[in-house]
Image (tube, rainbow, N blue to C red):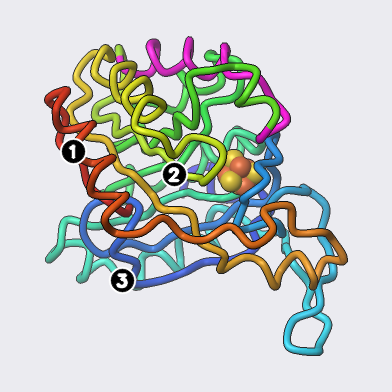
């Protein structure tokens, strides 16, 4: 057992048997903390690093708990037979895993020592050195590119996008596999022109062949009520299948393999 096993971090959920967020059957570890505040975020309870209380179905629920690499991996390892058969493994999600990069480093390194396939979902919004250190232990990087226009990016996520775009170029140089993901959000980035610009950027990245378009949904709306927060997306509807297929065709025209959904 290495020292990494006792490194502690803060998570708010572990979901088993996911077939999204990386190849095969996966266990998703959701970490607390995010530097962005996307208006559409469906996991608002992930954003603050602090442990919170949230109302759910009329009852108080504590969101967040401190744990160790060993405790997380003990849960993840239970599904090894499923990973082996399906090519799956562990995915770190959030929140933003880069908020807890020491914990994530220890977790990824220990997972690889245990021959577990690893994936991360990330905004890439952190100094590159933090990301670079993790890359040798990540099999698939699922990176969000939400918009190519920095002002619009900031208006909807609270942060500009220059660092994210710069990091995407650097990650593409060193990652084993990089897939670009785009949450398709009405009034933000759902025009053919906007998706074309993102797809062009994705296509320019070394080795990137795949882009995923994730349609906006309102599944997280009740959580805002539970946290005593206002839901900022109002009554916007999920993009229709027809619209998503049109946007998919835009990305495909640029020579990318495009999947709707994770
Ligand atoms: S980056 Fe993800 S977790 Fe963070 S606020 Fe945006 S949608 Fe939520």
Question: Could you tell me residue 181's position as x and y percent?
Answer: 37, 38
User: Does dot 2 land on a helix, a strand or a loop?
Assistant: strand
- Relative to 44, does residue 252 appear above or below in the rendering? above
Crowd rating for badge 1 (residues with CA inside 10 Å; few <14, some 14–19, many 20+):
some
Badge 3 is on which residue? 79
Q: CA distance from mark 3 to mark 1?
A: 36 Å
User: Does dot 1 land on a helix, a strand or a loop?
Assistant: helix
Q: Which residue lies at the image location 24% right of the left edge and 30% below the top edge?
A: 177
Q: Magenta stretch?
A: 156-172
- Relative to 206, does residue 27 appear above or below in the rendering? below
Question: Could you tell me residue 208's position as x and y percent?
Answer: 22, 24
**Closest to the observer, 1 or 228:** 228
Badge 2 is on which residue? 184
Q: CA distance from mark 2 to mark 1?
A: 14 Å
Q: Which residue lies at the image location 30% right of the left edge and 56% below the top edge?
A: 89
User: Does dot 3 land on a helix, a strand or a loop?
Assistant: loop
- Of mark 3 and mark 1, the one earlier in the sequence is 3
Crowd rating for badge 2 (residues with CA inside 10 Å; few <14, some 14–19, many 20+):
many
Question: Could you tell me residue 122's position as x and y percent?
Answer: 49, 36
Question: Which quadrant of the figure shows ligand 1?
Answer: top right
- Asked which quadrant contains residue 75, the reply is bottom left
Question: Could you tell me residue 141's position as x and y percent?
Answer: 35, 35
Task: Respond yes or no on whether mark 1 lies under 8 Å from ligand 1.
Answer: no
Badge 1 is on which residue? 249
Describe residue 203's horizontal placement relative to residue 257 as left or right: right
Nearer the camera: disc 2 or disc 3: 2
């Amino acid at each position: 057992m290495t020292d990494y096993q006792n490194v502690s971090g803060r998570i708010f959920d572990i979901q088993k048997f996911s077939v999204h967020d990386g190849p095969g059957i996966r266990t998703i570890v959701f970490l607390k903390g995010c530097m962005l505040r996307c208006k559409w975020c469906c996991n608002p309870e992930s954003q603050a690093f602090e442990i919170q209380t949230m109302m759910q179905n009329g009852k108080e629920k504590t969101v967040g708990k401190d744990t160790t690499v060993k405790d997380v991996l003990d849960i993840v390892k239970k599904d090894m037979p499923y990973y082996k058969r399906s090519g799956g493994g562990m995915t770190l999600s959030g929140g933003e895993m880069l908020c807890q990069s020491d914990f994530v480093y220890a977790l990824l390194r220990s997972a690889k020592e245990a021959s577990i396939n690893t994936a991360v979902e990330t905004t890439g919004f952190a100094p590159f050195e933090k990301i670079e250190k993790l890359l040798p232990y990540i099999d698939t990087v699922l990176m969000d590119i939400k918009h190519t226009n920095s002002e619009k990016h900031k208006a909807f996520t609270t942060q500009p996008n220059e660092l994210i775009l710069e990091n995407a170029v650097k990650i593409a140089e060193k990652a084993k596999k990089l897939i670009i993901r785009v949450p398709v959000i009405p009034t933000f980035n759902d025009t053919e022109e906007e998706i074309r610009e993102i797809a062009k950027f994705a296509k320019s990245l070394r080795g990137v062949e795949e882009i995923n378009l994730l349609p906006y949904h309102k599944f997280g709306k009740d959580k805002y009520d539970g946290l005593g927060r206002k839901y900022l997306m109002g009554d916007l509807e999920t993009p229709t299948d027809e619209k998503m297929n049109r946007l998919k065709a835009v990305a495909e025209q640029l020579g990318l393999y495009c999947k709707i959904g994770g």
